[in-house]
């Protein structure tokens, strides 16, 4: 075919951007409330809904306030709720026994959501940091975060959550071998339909600061998490972790943090084609909120743009503290 040598551009990519209808027609990705997993913080006590200063708009709720939140999430069409417990210093112990207590606030919250909204997908958090006296995700012996003894505790924790009604178990601890151990225990306990969303590629990130305030771990944490969470310089290692966790029985995998790690999301999705999620973590949320509160960015537009970026990078869904606000916007 003859090339067109005309006094006009042979391809005008602006044509399909000219009207809202044409833009909608050629749009490659979509974002809906069902893509969003909403992390909530629960605590002991009654009638409490308290602000978390480093996460404007996010609260910690006592368990009696959780059912209402779940009904609101269901009305908004949010895909799932993920429950994180706040534990004060007085309830943190070296043996972390609270973690697998069937009556701990997280498990009671899971049961309350299951009762209030039976169809809601409920995700749990499996890691010891929210119960540990030293804020680490595993047991600490002589300054070392020990792996195998921690995995045994994580298994008990996961079983207690499945028993409470969680249908997505979320190991966020980064110990080796925990996915296989949890899968085997779930099968053994008759929970063969309970899924595992593995925090497979979780980085030792400075973006988790506000979360550690939210769960009461900031003051507790001694040292850092670099011996179990990933080095932000690594990418191939993320693929090895995802391959490992899928082979051990993970149903879904997560990359965390989110926006600074979209390259990892894309590699994971392209390589494995498995259900892939990203966690838009507390520090990412706080940055957007802080800039918006200063009038420096348009919060609603930045929120939706950032969430769409995850879909474009290949994610099937996003854990985000913006879930209710975003779902409201997407609905309206
Ligand atoms: C720990 C855990 C962390 C987050 C979720 N689970 C923090 C950490 O690893 O120290 C962070 C989430 C966020 O920052 O929003 N098991």
Image: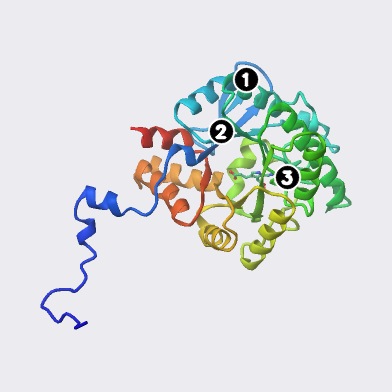
Residue beneath label 1, please? 115
Quadrant location of the N terminus? Answer: bottom left
Q: Is 46 displayed left or right of 304 in the figure?
A: right
- Dot 1 surroundings within 10 Å: few (below 14), some, or many (20 or more)? some
Residue 23 location, x and y as percent? 26, 52
Q: Quadrant of ligand 1?
A: top right
Q: At x 54% / y 62%, what residue is drawn?
A: 270
The answer to whether any part of residue 42 appears in the image is yes
What is the C-alpha distance between the residues marked 1 and 2? 27 Å
Residue 116 location, x and y as percent? 58, 19
- In the image, residue 63 sits, relative to residue 268, either above or below, namely above
Q: Secondary structure at mark 1?
A: helix
Q: Nearer the viewer, residue 247 or 125?
A: 247
- In the image, residue 233 sits, relative to residue 330, either above or below, namely below
Q: Quadrant of residue 299?
A: top left
Q: Secondary structure at mark 3?
A: loop
Q: Check mark 3 vs ligand 1: CB closer than 8 Å? yes or no.
A: yes
Residue beneath label 2, please? 52
| N-term-proximal mark, 2 vs 3 | 2
Q: Secondary structure at mark 2?
A: loop
Q: Check mark 1 vs ligand 1: CB closer than 8 Å? yes or no.
A: no
Q: At x 42% / y 35%, what residue is drawn?
A: 327
Q: Residue 221's mark?
A: 3
| N-term-proximal mark, 1 vs 2 | 2
- In the image, residue 9 sits, relative to residue 182, either above or below, namely below
What is the C-alpha distance between the residues marked 1 and 3? 34 Å
Q: At x 39% / y 51%, what residue is drawn?
A: 29
Mark 1 or mark 3: which is in front?
Answer: 1
Residue 3 location, x and y as percent? 20, 82
Quadrant location of the C terminus? Answer: top left
Residue 225 location, x and y as percent? 72, 53
Q: Nearer the viewer, residue 145 or 16?
A: 16
């Amino acid at each position: 075919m003859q090339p067109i040598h005309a006094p006009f551009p042979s391809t005008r990519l602006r044509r399909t951007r000219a009207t809202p209808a044409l833009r909608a027609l050629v749009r490659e990705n979509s974002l809906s409330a069902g893509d969003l997993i909403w992390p909530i913080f629960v605590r002991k006590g009654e009638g409490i809904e308290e602000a978390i200063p480093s996460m404007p708009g996010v609260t910690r709720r006592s368990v009696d306030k959780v059912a209402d939140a779940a009904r609101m999430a269901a009305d908004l069409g949010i895909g799932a709720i993920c429950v994180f417990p706040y534990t004060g210093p007085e309830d943190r112990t070296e043996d972390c026994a609270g973690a697998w207590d069937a009556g701990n606030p997280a498990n009671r919250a899971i049961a309350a959501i299951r009762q209030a909204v039976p169809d809601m997908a409920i995700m749990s958090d499996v890691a010891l940091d929210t119960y540990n006296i030293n804020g680490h995700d595993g047991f600490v012996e002589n300054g070392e975060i020990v792996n195998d003894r921690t995995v045994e505790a994580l298994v008990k924790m996961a079983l207690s959550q499945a028993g409470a009604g969680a249908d997505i178990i979320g190991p966020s601890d980064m110990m080796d071998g925990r996915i296989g151990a949890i899968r085997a225990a779930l099968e053994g306990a008759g929970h063969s339909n309970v899924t595992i969303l593995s925090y497979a590629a979780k980085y030792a990130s400075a973006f988790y600061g506000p979360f550690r305030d939210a769960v009461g771990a900031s003051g507790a944490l001694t040292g850092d998490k670099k011996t179990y969470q990933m080095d932000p310089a690594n990418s191939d290692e993320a693929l090895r972790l995802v391959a490992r966790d899928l082979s051990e029985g993970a149903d879904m995998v997560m990359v965390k943090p989110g926006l600074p790690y979209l390259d990892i999301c894309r590699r994971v999705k392209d390589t494995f084609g498995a259900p892939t999620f990203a966690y838009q973590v507390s520090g990412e949320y706080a940055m957007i909120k802080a800039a918006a509160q200063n009038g420096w960015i348009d919060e609603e537009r930045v929120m939706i743009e950032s969430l769409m970026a995850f879909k474009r990078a290949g994610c099937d869904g996003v854990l985000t503290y913006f879930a209710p606000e975003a779902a409201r916007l997407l609905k309206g």
